[in-house]
Image: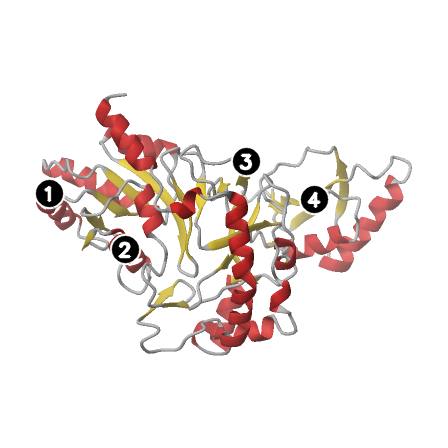
Amino acid sequence: MSPHAATQARAFSAPYDALETRDPAQREAAWMAALPAQVAHAQAHAPAFAELLHGVDARAIASREALATLPVTRKHALLARQKAARIFGGFSAVGFGVAMPRVFASPGTIYEPEGTAKDYWRMARAIHAAGFRPGELIHNAFSYHFVPAGSMMESGAHALGCSVFPGGTGQTEQQVQAMAELCPAGYIGTPSFLKIILEKAAEMGVKLPSVGKALFSGEAFPPSLRDWFLAQGVAGYQCYATADLGLIAYETSAREGLVLDEGVIVEIVRPGTGDPVPEGEVGELVVTTLNPTYPLIRFGTGDLSAVLPGPCPTGRTNTRIKGWLGRADQTTKVRGMFVHPSQVADIVRRFPQVQRARLVVSGEMANDRMTLQVEAPGVSFSESNGWVQQVAEAIREVTKLRGEVAIVPPGSLPNDGKVIEDARSYQ
C-alpha cells in the first residue's frame, strides 16, 4: 500500500466521535437508562403511543427483555392510523410550527416530520464513515421534493462542516457540468444515478477527477457495482436509513457489514411477531428511536437482516448487521385467502417442540398445496403421527386452510428469515 493510500485508509477508518468506540456495556447502560424516559415521553406526547402503551409502566422498560414485551408498530399500521385519524397518525410528539420546520412524504402516502435538532436525521456519522471531512463540497443527488432524502443528507453534511450542491435528480448533462466546474470531493445519492453520470461524462469527454468518494443509499449496492466504481476511482460506501427513523446503520472502510447508529436501539425479531431471534439468525429489524420529536417505539421496518458477530475492525464497538437481506412481509395468497407470517407464528407458539418452521406453498396456480416444514427434535418417532395431526389441525384452525406437516432434520431449514416460501410455478 502506498503512503498516500495508507493515509487515506486511516482517515476513512477514524471514528466520528467517542460514542463509536465506547465500551459496549457502557453503551447498553446508557441506552437502557434513556429508554424509560423515552417511553414515558411517547406516552405523554404522542397520542398513538398513549393508546398503544396504555397501562405500561415506563419506569419498568429498562432492559431489552422488558422492551420485547411492548407491541411492534409496523408501517402498514402507521399508514392506517394516518388515514383514519390525523397527519402523522398521532405518532408525532410535536405539532406544526417552529418545532417542525418541514414535513415530508414517502410512498404510501406516509407523512414524516422534521424536527429542529442539529443533524436531525443523524446522517453525519454515515457521511464521515464514507470519508467526507469538514471543508469539502458534496454533490447531493437525492431528491429535495416530497421525500426527505435530500434534506437528510444535506443536514448531515452541514453538521459535519461540509458545503452542499443540491443537485437533486435528473438533468444528467447539467450534473456533469456542475461536477466538472465545482470539483466536489464526492457524491451522495443512489449508486445507479452516479453510474449514469459517470457514463454520461465519459460520453461527453469530460473528466471528473475530484469525485473520489461516495455515500450511497436507497438501492442495493452489490460488490460488482462497488468494484466498478473503484475502477473509476470512486470509493463508494453505503448506509441504511429510512424516512421514519433516519440513520439506522452505515458501512465503514472495513466493508464488513453495517455498524448500527448510536441513536437507535435495534432488535431483530421473527417475522410476524415481536419475539427477538438468537444472534446470527435472520429476522425483521425492529427499531426504537431516541428521537423526542418522532418517538417511534419498536417500529417494524419490514426489512430482514442479521447480527454479525464481533466488533468492526475499524475500532467501532457497536453491533454490526449484515445489511438488507429482503422483506419481512411474506404474506401470500393461497386458494383465494391471505396467509400471514403472524399466523405461522401463532401455530408454532402452540407447540414448544418446534425450534424453527417454514410454510412452503407449492403446486401450480389454482392447485395450491401448503406444507409446514418444522424442525422438532423433541418429537420422538413413536409420537410423531399423532403430533403431526395436531399441528395440521392447528394450521386449519388458524388459516382456515388445509395444510400438510413435514418434520425435517434440525438445522436443515435455511437461515434466511423466510417464514412463508412461495414455491409455486407461475408458468
Q: Which residue is mark 3?
A: 309
State how far apart marks 4 and 3 are (Cα). 24 Å
Q: Are marks 3 and 1 in contact (CB under 8 Å)?
A: no
Mark 2 or mark 4, earlier in chain = 2
| Left or right of 300, for residue 55 | right
Q: Which mark is residue 357?
A: 4
173 or 232: nearer the viewer? 232
Q: Amino acid at mark 3?
A: Pro
Determine which residue is flagged by label 2: 159
Residue 366: give x, y in percent of width and height: 64, 51
- Mark found first going from the N terminus, 3 or 1: 1
Q: At 47% across and 61% down in the image, what residue appears?
A: 290
Task: Measure how far apart labels 4 and 1 are at the Cα level.
Answer: 55 Å
Dot 2 or dot 3: first in sequence order is: 2
Q: How many angstroms separate mark 3 from mark 1 (CA)?
A: 43 Å
Q: Quarter of the image containing the C terminus?
A: top right
Depth check, front residue: 276 or 35:
35
Q: Residue furthest top?
A: 1
Dot 1 corresponds to which residue? Answer: 180
Q: Nearer the viewer, mark 4 or mark 1?
A: 1
Marks 2 and 1 sit apart, C-alpha to C-alpha, by 25 Å
